[in-house]
């Protein structure tokens, strides 16, 4: 009977999401359009170790509880290529002769300070104040040229690293936000150069000091850091439902769906971030798989507990392996090769945090009810289903009608005005009957149905008031 009760909940969950019109209704658990750089998706492809850790937890039937600290998962860029580039530039285009030329090009003919007595009229470089000013302005111009080369070099090694990641990891989707603050790093480099100006006034000595500065201060850069990426995600995605999507199934230029997913939260704890599951409900995207009209229907439940994740996923995997003639397991394998077959949608490895903006929360409600049955909590619901199936549920329609006629006689003012001693609100006939049905202890469930504007919300309020009044007396 428990399996039948779960089937009923699964039916209503699927009905709420699809109305069983898979081709015309957009399923809530769907990947955002890959042709756009969506802010609702944070791909984790560049952090394969973290992906493996997530899959390992699921394989152990454990809820998600992963703390990420700065530096735990990071992708560095080696600074050595940038050092070599700048040293080559310092020995070529920015050698000491370049600085000497910059010095000679500065014109101080309009200097407001007159030359001291005894100096030649054109000997401005010999004047202490003018010589220092000329040196500072010339070195600043020199440093600005080196700063531009630094910026070009930093951008080049950054792009080279992105291209290398794309090839090595086979990335097709967009990268997460880059953590390297290039403008700040570039400004810091320039400020350090400016601090060298006061250490010497010899062009050759200054260029040598700059080269030593380049060699000693430029280290590796952090292009991506998962902790920083998750913190940015937590701030940017707000209070919308956040899910961890697993893999994608779909055809080229058509909607693509995750095979399974889990609602998660990102808790900020100082500089670290905690990724955790918010419910003991692991969502199986059965309706999406069935939307591709395989020659048979996948009948797994819409959800399961984390403790039952592996057998539930194995049922989906067996279904897909039979359709694609895939010899090996793949759903919990890190970076599995695409699963393809003629006339069938492709299945590709993918893992990302995804905002679900148009989610019908009733689907999650039904999914949680499904999981509570497995926990043994839903005994009352199972018993209720059992009684209805066995025909042991008494109809109280006649009792309600008799009670209505007794409380609201046809020639009584109560037919027009509900007794204020019961509930001081106007009620129509169906609402009065529903209140009587709620008073009957034999009615364990009452379904209130009707089109918009017929008073469903009002009767719920009336029942709540009746309970409050009863508790007060």
Image: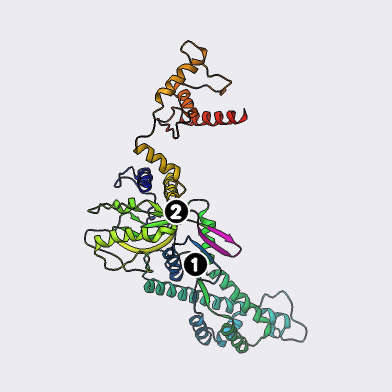
Which residue is nearer to you in this view: 182 or 364?
Answer: 364
- Residue located at (52% from left, 12% from top): 413
Mark 1 — residue? 178
Q: Quadrant of residue 255?
A: bottom left
Q: Quadrant of residue 44?
A: bottom left
Our reading of the magenta stretch's main secondary structure is strand
Mark 2 — residue? 281
Mark 2 burial class by Cα count in 10 Å: few <14, some 14-19, many 20+: many
Question: How far from the left and from the top, in percent, is residue 389?
Answer: 34, 38
Considering every residue shown, the one lying at the far right of the view is 117
Task: First in sequence, mark 1 or 2: give its number.
Answer: 1
124 relative position to 290: left or right: right
Name the element at disc 1.
loop
The answer to whether one can see residue 34 in this image is no
Question: How far from the left and from the top, in percent, is residue 336?
Answer: 34, 68
The answer to whether one can see residue 274 in this image is yes
Question: How far from the left and from the top, in percent, is residue 435?
Answer: 49, 26
């Amino acid at each position: 009977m428990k399996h039948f009760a779960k089937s009923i909940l699964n039916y209503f969950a699927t009905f709420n999401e699809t109305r069983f019109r898979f081709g015309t209704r957009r399923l809530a658990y769907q990947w955002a359009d890959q042709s756009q750089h969506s802010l609702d998706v944070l791909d984790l492809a560049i952090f394969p170790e973290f992906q493996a850790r997530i899959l390992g937890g699921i394989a152990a039937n454990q809820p998600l509880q992963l703390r990420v600290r700065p530096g735990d998962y990071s992708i560095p860029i080696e600074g050595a290529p940038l050092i070599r580039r700048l040293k080559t530039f310092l020995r070529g285009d920015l050698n000491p002769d370049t600085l000497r030329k910059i010095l000679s090009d500065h014109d101080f003919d309009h200097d407001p300070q007159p030359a001291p007595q005894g100096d030649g009229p054109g000997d401005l470089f010999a004047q202490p104040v003018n010589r220092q000013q000329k040196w500072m302005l010339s070195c600043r111009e020199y440093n600005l040229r080196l700063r531009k080369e630094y910026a070009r070099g930093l951008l080049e090694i950054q792009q080279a690293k992105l291209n290398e990641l794309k090839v090595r990891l086979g990335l097709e989707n967009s990268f997460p936000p880059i953590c390297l603050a290039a403008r700040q790093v570039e400004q810091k480099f320039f400020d350090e150069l400016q601090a060298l100006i006061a250490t010497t006034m010899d062009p050759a000595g200054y260029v040598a000091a700059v080269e030593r500065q380049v060699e000693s201060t430029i280290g590796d850069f952090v292009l991506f850091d998962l902790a920083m990426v998750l913190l940015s995600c937590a701030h940017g995605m707000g209070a919308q439902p956040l899910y961890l999507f697993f893999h994608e199934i779909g055809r080229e230029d058509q909607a693509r769906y995750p095979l399974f997913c889990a609602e998660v939260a990102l808790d900020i704890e100082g500089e670290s971030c905690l990724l955790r599951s918010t419910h003991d409900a692991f969502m199986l995207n059965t309706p999406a798989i069935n939307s591709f009209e395989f020659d048979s229907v996948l009948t797994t439940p819409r959800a399961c507990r984390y403790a039952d994740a592996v057998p539930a996923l194995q049922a989906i995997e067996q279904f897909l392996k039979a359709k694609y003639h895939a010899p090996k397991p793949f759903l919990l394998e890190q970076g599995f090769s695409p699963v393809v077959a003629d006339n069938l949608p492709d299945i590709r490895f993918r893992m990302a945090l995804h905002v679900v903006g148009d989610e019908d929360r009733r689907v999650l409600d039904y999914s949680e009810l499904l999981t509570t049955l497995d926990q043994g909590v839903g005994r009352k619901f199972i018993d209720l289903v059992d009684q209805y199936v066995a025909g042991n549920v008494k109809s109280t329609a006649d009792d309600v009608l008799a009670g209505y006629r007794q409380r609201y006689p046809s020639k009584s003012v109560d037919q027009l005005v509900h007794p204020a001693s019961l509930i001081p609100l106007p009620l129509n006939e169906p609402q009065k009957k529903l209140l009587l049905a709620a008073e009957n202890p034999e009615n364990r469930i009452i379904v209130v149905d009707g089109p918009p504007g017929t008073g469903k919300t009002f009767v719920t309020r009336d029942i709540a008031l009746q309970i409050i009044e009863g508790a007060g007396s």
